[in-house]
Image (cartoon, rainbow, N blue to C red):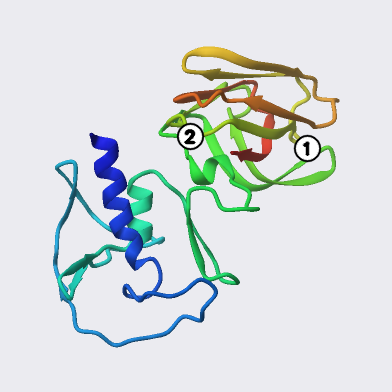
Amino acid sequence: MKLHRVRDFLAGALTMALVAGLAVPAGAALASKTIQVLTGSEIYVDGVKMEPTDANGNPVDTFVYNGTTYVPLRAVSEYLGKNVSWDGASQRVYIGEAPGVKQYLNTVCPPYQSSYFESHATVEMSGRKYANAAQYGWGNKDGWALYNLNGQYETLSFDMGHLDGEVMDKGTLNIYLDGNLAFSADMEAEDLPEHYTVDLHNALQMKIEMTNGYYRLANLEID
């Protein structure tokens, strides 16, 4: 029953995906329109009040126009755990996966609990620069992060390597799915970065754990 309510709510929000509820045919140019609206409507999802915000976390208004309540699409989608992207070329809004667009783990599904965890835009391993990276552990401190995958993802891929300039030591990566060890890899400091792909089996929860914090995971893609 809850699933149907969420779908109906999201479907209603999609009506304002582009500009103030204007109906725009596929491929057509966007148009602007000045309208008068009523603001101040409160939105509740399963009895919990939603506080809509923009991409920067600033509060945004809901409003009523011609008897229809409009809610910011990004606020609704992110509240329901979905990433939102905009394709300017096709003038399309995508909720969740977008064709040909890579999804990075710590962007679309950041950890809800962690210890000695940080994400990085870039890192250098074996003389090469890698993007969309994360560290699980600092120095000789072990680290971990918990992710709520909600059964939405099938695979995780990444490059694992030793961070340049750090202590030369062995590291071990363990990945748990729903509490069970699903993947483990050992690496020596002299090893070149290796690429791995892990089958997520549409798990609900994932834990990434690293013993020895001198290693990084980069190009962390999830789909």
The residue that appears at 55% across and 74% down in the rendered structure is: 27
Quadrant showing the C terminus: top right
Secondary structure under the numbered disc 1 in the rendered image: loop
Q: Is residue 92 visible?
A: yes
Label 1 vs label 2, nearer the camera: 2
Label 1 neighbour load within 10 Å: few <14, some 14-19, many 20+: some
Q: State left or right for residue 102 relative to residue 76.
A: right
The residue that appears at 15% across and 71% down in the rendered structure is: 67
Q: Mark 1: which amino acid?
A: Asp
Secondary structure under the numbered disc 2 in the rendered image: loop
Q: Which percent across, then down, holds residue 202?
A: 51, 27
The residue that appears at 82% across and 45% down in the rendered structure is: 128
Label 2 neighbour load within 10 Å: few <14, some 14-19, many 20+: some
Closer to the camera in the image, 106 or 91: 91
Which residue, given by chain and number where applicable, does mark 2 sit on? 152
Answer above or below: position of 56 versus 121. below
Give whichever of discs 1 and 2 has the lower sequence position: 2
Q: Is residue 170 visible?
A: no
Q: Mark 2: which amino acid?
A: Gln
Q: State left or right for residue 176 relative to residue 78.
A: right
The residue that appears at 69% across and 34% down in the rendered structure is: 158
Answer above or below: position of 160 versus 176. below
Q: State left or right for residue 32 relative to residue 209.
A: left
Q: Which percent across, then down, holds residue 38?
A: 14, 75
Closer to the camera in the image, 88 or 157: 88
User: How far is the residue under mark 1 from the one under mark 2?
Assistant: 34 Å
Answer above or below: position of 46 versus 115. below
Which mark is drawn over residue 164? Answer: 1
